[in-house]
Amino acid sequence: ISVVCVGVEISHAVERRPASGDFRVQEEYSGTCTAVTPGAQVLNTVDSLLSVLRSKFGSLPTYVRLDLLPSPHPTSPHAPAPLRLLEVALVEPELFLDWAPECTTRLAACIARSFPPPCYLILHSVAKRHNIGTLAQ
């Protein structure tokens, strides 16, 4: 499962699966992607990982994608397998915005807030002109 966080909150999640007989999950290799609602185990794991990022770097990045995979070695036959972190994607990650179009406005606002006010106003004006929503203050 890939979980996308924008600002300090979880935005959306997708489950990626490889094509039969392959291990690659990317669509260019015939992998599939489906929007999913993360369960409690995923939410707890993501919260823990975000806490680690926050304590390590002092704050959270504007956006991050956390790729998780169930461990092949469950700790108990009656409990779900613990989730393992595969990747923390920070630089040019696939954010799966096609599966959560409402995320684009929040993402644009988070990015814009990281710029000084004159840049923010320019970005706000571009967003309005291209009808991608307004940037929250």
Image (cartoon, helix red, strand yellow):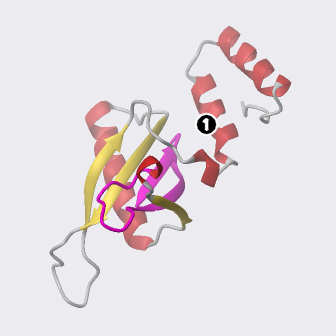
Q: Position of residue 77 (x, y in %)?
A: 20, 89
In the picture, measured across the screen, residue 64 lies left or right of residue 96, that is left
**The N terminus appears in which quarter of the rendering?**
bottom left
Is residue 28 placed above or below 108 in the rendered structure? Answer: below
Occupied quadrant, residue 18? bottom left
Residue at screen point 39% across, 65% down:
42
Is residue 111 placed above or below 8 in the rendered structure? Answer: above
Q: Is residue 22 magenta?
A: yes
Residue at screen point 61% across, 12% down:
116
Kind of residue at badge 1: Leu
Residue at screen point 55% across, 22% down:
114
Occupied quadrant, residue 89? top left
Segment tinted magenta in the rendering: 1-26
Identify the residue under disc 1.
Answer: 107
Q: Residues within 10 Å of mark 1 (few under 14, many from 20)?
A: some
Task: Name the element at disc 1.
Answer: helix
Q: Residue furthest bottom?
A: 78
Is residue 134 placed above or below 2 in the rendered structure? Answer: above
Is residue 128 placed above or below 24 in the rendered structure? Answer: above
Q: Position of residue 36 (x, y in %)?
A: 53, 67
**The C terminus appears in which quarter of the rendering?**
top right
Return the residue nearer the eye: 28 or 136.
Answer: 28
Residue at screen point 30% across, 60% down:
22
Q: Position of residue 48 (x, y in %)?
A: 32, 55
